[in-house]
Amino acid sequence: MTQTRSLVRRAALAATAVSAAFVLAACGSDDGSDSGAGSGAQPSASASAEGTAGAHNDQDVSFAQGMIPHHQQAIEMAGMAADQASSAEVKDLASRIEKAQDPEIKTMTGWLESWGEDVPSAMPGMDHSGHSSDSGMPGMMDKEDMDELMKASGKDFDRKFLTLMVEHHEGAVEMATTEKEKGQYGPATKMADDIITAQNAEIEEMNKILGKD
């Protein structure tokens, strides 16, 4: 009987010792992993997230540097409509183009400044130096196009404006499509997607006004 009690006591002590060992091992593991996470894992994850949010590539830079003057020329063209267009539809469309593209210019300018990249200062539409074959930007009007539009008025302006703006928008859609496919910066690819949607809708609208359903 005494021997049995002794065996039971030994078994209980052994079990207690094993349990204590597991608890200590677990505590040691937790302490080690916590200290490791605190000193390395969490900041690393945070830095990685920040890096992804701000990551950009050469395509993103090219997109912003190209789309800024492209938008500037569209705004200049749209600005002529207030005094030279005869159609209320054309004037309304031109106003919407200005309101949509001016904020995008400011946004893209901010990206380039934050990336330490050059911000385009010349507006091809204003100095009449823009030409699609020279600038590499599809849809840009050349000096002759802009001069003709500037001299036009009434229904002649409406027709020229719509015809040229369809071409201009198609160029912007092409540039935005390249950004969507090759860009890395999330906000830039999102803007590109918005440009594609909005300007394709305006192209359809302008073609309807021109009678090209």
Image: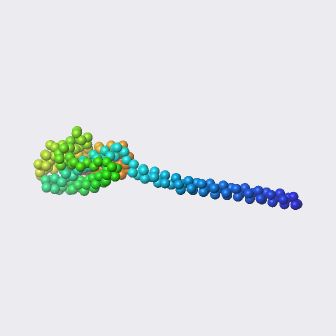
Q: Is residue 185 above or below residue 16?
A: above
Q: Examine the rendering and report whether any part of residue 61 can be seen.
A: yes
Looking at the image, which is closer to me, 136 or 17? 17
Q: In the orientation shown, which residue stands out farthest toward the right?
A: 1
Numbered disc total = 0
148 with respect to 118 (left or right): left
Residue 18 coordinates in the image, percent (x, y): 72, 55
Tell me where residue 22 appears, x and y as whole percent.
68, 55
Question: Front-most of 170 and 124?
Answer: 124
Which color scheme did the rendering employ for the protein?
rainbow
Which residue is rendered at x = 19% and y = 50% of the image? 77
Furthest residue toward top: 133
Residue shown at 28% from the left, 54% from the top: 106
Along the line of sight, the residue nearer the viewer: 150 or 184? 184
Residue 34 spot, x, y in % from top left? 57, 56
- Tell me: 38 left or right of 142: right
Which residue does the image show at 34% across and 50% down from the upper left?
A: 115
Locate the N terminus by quadrant. Answer: bottom right
In the image, is residue 10 above or below residue 180?
Answer: below
Q: Residue at x 85, y 58 (%)?
A: 4
Residue 160 in percent (x, y) is at 16, 47
Asked whether residue 93 appears in the rendered view, the answer is no
